[in-house]
Image: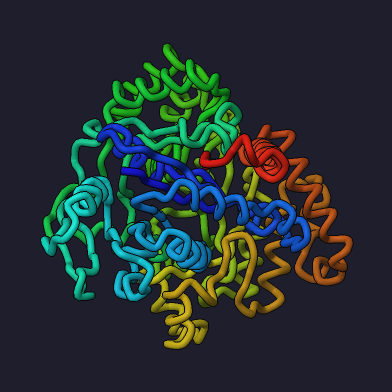
Amino acid sequence: MKIAFISIAYESLAISILSAIAKKEGHDVRLIHIPTIFKDGLTREFKKLAKLFSNDKQIFEQLKVYQPDLIAFSVATFDYQRALHYAKKFKMICPKTKIVFGGIHVSCVPEVVIANNFIDYIVIGEGEIAFSSIIKHIEKGDSSEPIVNTWYKSKNNTIIKGKQIGFIQDLDSLPHFDKEIWKEVSPLKSYYMTMTSRGCPFNCSYCFNHFFRNIPDEKSNYVRRRSVKHVMEELTIAKEKYNISMIEFWDDIFIFDKVWLKEFLDAYKKEISLPFKCYIHVNLFNEDIAIQLKNAGCRWVDFGIQHINEEYRKKYLKRNETNANIINALKILKKHKIVSFADYIMDLPGNTVEHYEEARLFFIENMPDIIEPYWMSYHPQTEIIEKGVEHDILNDEKMNLIKVGLCHRGYFESSMPTQDFHNQYYFILKVLPAVPVFLRKKLTYNVSKKITYFIKLPIFIYSILYLGFIHKSPRIKLFFALYSKLMIWILKLKFIPHKYVGKI
């Protein structure tokens, strides 16, 4: 069978694992990559540049030549509308091709997604077993048997709903991520991403984990981990094949299992010994873990603060760490010279100027190396929606728009009407670590309001680049490497098309 995986904007580990499974089963696999350069939220949108670096024409031509039997999308809420746009176009080009949608957004609102007449199958929850079954179902032809974790339309347009089985417990039974499909579009050498586990032990109200863990009809462990041996096999192959120079572990919480962590870090130091970044939680972090991480090559860690008011954080976000825990983690990280990225959510329901001011004063005394403010992004089925309704941010109309991927706030920019003080404090928190210590107290809300946009913009950009440079940020490295590689790749597609005919 010929299978085309659709990636929008960035590398996807979900696509990588499904591609590995499809290849293992003997299918022909292609990647159709849709870049969103200059319109991805990482930069301001520049319409002319975005149009120049669009590869739509080439994608449509190549798809017409390839004529896959199956086209697969993995989507989140923020790229759902883009995915629909391309799926509809692809169905017109390849009318006999089956289209399958999976991903977090599909699991949130399956009835909304399956209602699109150009989508044939949707996957709810984990997709590995379902995807293999969908392939076999397509190969069989006319059949109305249910498929696990899947809804699909029968020939008489009836929706057939399969059972939601438990989560895969033995992650070692899965093949390693297929990185080969990304080599043309992703800077694997500069930035290698992987995961050693699935699931999160915490239950934050704004995160998909708290409903995703309850999707299966069969109950099973939600938090699972690959063996040290399995992860080391993957990284050894990547190091030899792609000459990788740094790794980011995208586990929700990398340090949750202390026994596994020690075994892994000992093996990693001995066999891989490359700089890496991971995600921690301050309630699970201590000096012993910091020493182990540092000795193994950890240079950066990311952790969520999200809100500095303890009462708000516990009541609204279901986060139970104290500010004392945060302060302790920051002190340990500074002591061992591990760069700290602290995530902070802006424009949460009920956020006030007083909350932000509390955060500003806290950070002046307890400064992370980099503060990463993100705009609140509402996802269907998350508990935080109740608070959005309570504070008149959300209503039925807006929720219906969010379900179809509209009226959706991006992580990097606000798309809903936002009061000015949210924007002012976004600027303050973003640039504060780059401001000289003796000036930090002077960067107040009133001062920020007086600074014009045309002065703020260069300060904002300078702060990002300065902090990225002095801390050797993997995100800045990825940004430049990714944009450079994609621009060269797209220009090749446009001006040397004969080389790429039939190759996506």
> Of 358 and 133, which appears nearest the observer?
133
- Rendered location of residue 26, percent (x, y): 28, 33
Residue at position x 30%, y 49% in the image: 201
Task: Describe the colour scheme in one phrase.
Answer: rainbow
Quarter of the rendering containing residue 311: bottom left
Q: Position of residue 337 (x, y in %)?
A: 60, 29
Picture coordinates of residue 270, whole percent (x, y): 42, 12
With respect to residue 248, does 411 lie above or below? Answer: below
Q: Which residue is pictured at 63% across the width and 57% down the height?
A: 40
Residue 149 visible in the shown view: yes
Q: Nearer the viewer, residue 217 or 370?
A: 217
Left or right: 200 with respect to 311? left
Q: Count the marks: how many?
A: 0
The residue at 31%/38% (across/down) is 27
**Front-lying residue, 94 or 120:** 94
On the question of residue 313 being in view, the answer is no
Residue 49 coordinates in the image, percent (x, y):
76, 56
Q: Is residue 123 left or right of residue 163?
A: right
User: Could you say which quadrant of the image residue 51 lies in?
Assistant: bottom right
Q: Is residue 420 above or below residue 289?
A: below
> Which quarter of the image is occupied by the N terminus?
top left
Q: In the rendered view, tell whether residue 467 sits above or below residue 96.
A: above
Q: Is residue 457 rendered to the left or right of residue 313?
A: right
